[in-house]
């Protein structure tokens, strides 16, 4: 009887671990498709200490994240790391992925992206874009 209980406890533990991994993978893989084209944008704001400016900018980034062709989305700020090779002078990082170049091109021409460029371009002093594709 003890062996049976031990067996079921192990199975339950594996089930819980499996459920956790499935939930984690599902949350991470909010990705709608395989991501092979990465578009990474860094923004330096004119008024980064103003909470209203930051909130408005974050809302604009989140809205851009709703564009259908995006398969991966990460909006971030600099991590608290300090090494010679790290540039953490930017204020926001906007990392998005696409299934392919076509998805990227749809994003570039999307009305939400156009709206963001038109309504928010006066909020930054510098923007850098890095695009990359899978090997």
Image (spheres, rainbow, N blue to C red):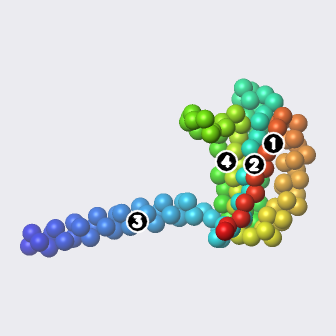
- In the displayed structure, 110 sits above or below 51; it is below
Q: Which badge, 4 or 2, is on the more N-terminal residue?
A: 2
45 or 40, which is in the foreground? 40
Label 4 sits on residue: 75
Nearest to the eye among marks 4 and 1: give it. 1
Q: Are marks 2 and 1 in contact (CB under 8 Å)?
A: yes
Label 1 sits on residue: 127
| Disc 3/disc 4 C-alpha distance (Å) | 27 Å
Q: Which badge, 3 or 2, is on the more N-terminal residue?
A: 3
* In the image: residue 47, left or right of residue 34: right
SS assignment at label 4: strand
Q: Quadrant of the N terminus?
A: bottom left
| Disc 1/disc 3 C-alpha distance (Å) | 40 Å
Residue 19, which numbered label?
Answer: 3
5 or 42, which is in the foreground? 42
Q: Position of residue 97 (x, y in %)?
A: 70, 61
| Disc 2/disc 1 C-alpha distance (Å) | 7 Å
What is the quadrant of residue 85 in the picture? top right
- In the displayed structure, 15 sits above or below 58; it is below
Q: Which badge, 1 or 3, is on the more N-terminal residue?
A: 3
Q: Position of residue 127 (x, y in %)?
A: 81, 42
- In the displayed structure, 1 sits above or below 20; it is below
Q: Residue at x 34, y 63 (%)?
A: 16
Label 2 sits on residue: 41
Nearest to the eye among marks 3 and 2: give it. 2
Q: Residues within 10 Å of mark 1 (few under 14, many from 20)?
A: some
Q: Quadrant of the C terminus?
A: bottom right
Q: Which badge, 2 or 1, is on the more N-terminal residue?
A: 2
Q: Residues within 10 Å of mark 3 (few under 14, many from 20)?
A: few
């Amino acid at each position: 009887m003890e062996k049976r209980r031990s067996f079921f406890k192990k199975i339950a533990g594996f089930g819980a671990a499996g459920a956790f991994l499935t939930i984690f993978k599902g949350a991470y893989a909010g990705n709608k498709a395989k991501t092979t084209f990465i578009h990474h944008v860094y923004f330096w704001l004119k008024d980064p200490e103003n909470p209203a400016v930051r909130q408005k900018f974050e809302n604009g980034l989140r809205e851009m994240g709703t564009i259908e062709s995006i398969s991966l989305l990460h909006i971030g700020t600099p991590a608290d790391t300090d090494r010679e090779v790290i540039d953490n002078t930017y204020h926001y990082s906007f990392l998005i992925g696409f299934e392919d170049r076509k998805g990227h091109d749809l994003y570039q021409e999307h009305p939400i992206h156009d709206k963001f460029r038109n309504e928010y371009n006066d909020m930054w002093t510098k923007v850098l874009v890095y695009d990359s594709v899978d090997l």
